[in-house]
Amino acid sequence: MPDRPGPAVRQLPVSWTLSAHGRRLLTLATAGLVLALLTQRPEFAGLAAPALLLLATWRPHPPRTLAVQIEMVNRQIPEGEIVPVRLGLDGQDGYETALRIVPAADITAGPDVIIPRGTDRPGKPVRLHFQPERWGSRPPGAVEIVLRDYARLAEGRLPVSLPAIRCVPRPAALQGTILLSRLPARLGEHSARAVGEGGEFGGVREFVPGDRQRRINWPATTRLGTLHLSTFAAERIQNVVIIADITADVGEAGLTTLDLALRGAAGAFTRYLAGRDRVGLVRYGGGLGWIGPGQGRRHADRLMDLLVQGPAAAERPSSVTRLPRAALPPGALILVFTPLLDPRLIETLRDLRERGFSVLVVDVLNSSPQHDGSTLSGLASRIWQLEQQAIRFSLTQIGIPVVHWDGIAGLDEPLAPFTRRVIAVRR
Amino acid sequence: MIARLPGQEDTGTADEAARRADGQPLTATRPTAWRAGVASALLAAAVVGWAAIPVGTGRAGTKIALIAAIATAVLSVGQLSLSGVRPLEPDVLSGLLTQFAERLLYFVRAAPWAEIMIVAVLALEALHPARPWHTALLGVALIAYLFAVHLAETRARLSVLAPQLPVLAAGVGLLALAVGAAAVPGLPHGGTSLLIRAVAITAAVIVAAMAVPGNDARR
């Protein structure tokens, strides 16, 4: 499970207090004895007897420190994945040990675990679980270790902070890919229109001196009487740049425009990188961050890190309408996940189209402003909807298709019209 | 409140394996918590009712003690049931309702209501005429209530109390002895003799309690 060397064992201090149960027993015993003396009724002293006997089992020298070793995964964790925490403990000295995760926000803790009194489990770690509900880099909470004595009168508490996790958006499901008709002249895995050295049959042409003899198509040669040879399609790579618009975060919790933009972007670059394409990422909003196209597992990790990093890490996008050239290789397919609420991004999209890029917008807006039912409010809402329709129509008119994604189904459904055939590049 | 993970039954697999290896149970605590909560609520109602009857025979202040006992019993049960509730988020409710809910939550959590209830119930019992066996049953019910509250708070199973049974049995035996002594007829009446009897029984209980912790085998 661990992706790093075993963590160090730490000796942590345990703070002991009278437990709530102990306090209540003490109250019962004291009140019984006091009432026995005040009322001169011995039955109250008898009433205090069970509590007093239990209090008398108090153990005076509890363990002051505990050896704790926490082992957790050190990798990117997708939203909703159950994360195991292995906890090694030593030094309980026969005390019952209860362990539970006190979760931070957007974290769901798994069940508590109790190591019964007198159970010696040296070297056998306890396994707890938690589940991050939303992406982000943050500490998931703390493990609370509670030691209890024989009569559960005293409690030794020891909170142990869990190391921060890197929770990444759950990639949206995407099986198909959008393929452009014109691909850059780099060896890849997509069959291009150009003739090359690939494995897909392209056609038959007449032999000219200098051609390789092993490509001679003997059936055609026999039929036509002159030497003919087979041609094959070139195998090219595709450059894909994904723009995740994080300028707005509106909508139902868990399905906000920000969540959907990040999940969509993560799903798209995961799919294209799996197809050995070169993928770049532009994180638009809060700060403009970008990574140029690349390939491989490490590149995927870098893209994911950029996707979930805090907004302070990059420059302000206040006046950015032109994206940097280095982030946009010529002829790249540009996939934009956006709610189309930021006019600067819409300007940027128009600029990209004017520069000749093939752009496709995935609209992740699934909510509209609430109105109170009044005529004025309804009118404002209607105007807003018309504006949104106008924005989408204007983009379509300049050759930028806009598809809507609800965030629940996979991306294949909205992208189906574009993944079934090669998209002709229009300059 | 700690939410349950989907497929929670599977999450303890490694621990279950460890349990099999060790021959010791790693207890999943949650399923019994609500039962202990219900038991503590019923026992709270029972002890208040038992200490209150008959209401008419009590001395001055009985009704005040009864009101206090009922209020603290309700608050202690409320405290128990709200123990897992997180502080309210601003967008859950709005305005005055949020403020009221937050203050109510703070009030319910602020004081040790179970302890106050114990004192109120004992005061209620003391305001009634002497009735040793009635008081003894009240004592047993109070101890049961305290354990039920503890089990509900810690979400532990009933079996964790098994090692304490001998001590509890000894305590109940002492309680029976004390009550029996209080009920013995024929002793000379008067304040002095009652005081001497009460002090003697208290001393006996304390001596018995001091004798218990020497037994290390029980731990």
Image (cartoon, coloured by chain):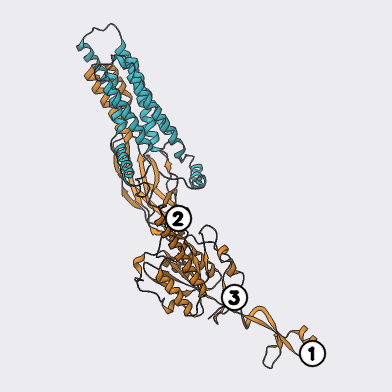
Q: Quadrant of residue A192 in the image?
A: bottom right
Picture colour for chain B = cyan
User: Which one is closest to the eye, mark 2 or mark 3?
Assistant: 2
Q: Which residue is mark 1?
A: A225
Q: Which of marks 2 and 1 precedes in the sequence?
A: 1
- Chain letter behind tag 1: A
Q: Residues within 10 Å of mark 1 (few under 14, many from 20)?
A: few
Calculate the distance from the C-alpha at mark 2 to the C-alpha at mark 3. 36 Å
Q: Which mark is residue A190?
A: 3
Q: What's under tag 2, amino acid-wise? A: Gly
Whether callout 2 and callout 3 share a subunit is answered yes
Q: Residues within 10 Å of mark 3 (few under 14, many from 20)?
A: many
In the rendered view, does A274 fall on the left or right side of A89? right
Q: Assess whether mark 2 and mark 1 are in contact (beta carbons under 8 angstroms).
A: no
Q: Which of marks 3 and 2 precedes in the sequence?
A: 3
Query: Is residue A46 something that shows in the picture?
Result: yes
Q: Which mark is residue A254?
A: 2
In the rendered view, does A58 fall on the left or right side of A189? left
Residue A302 versus residue B80 in the image, above or below: below
In the rendering, at what x and y percent does residue B188 appear?
A: 23, 7
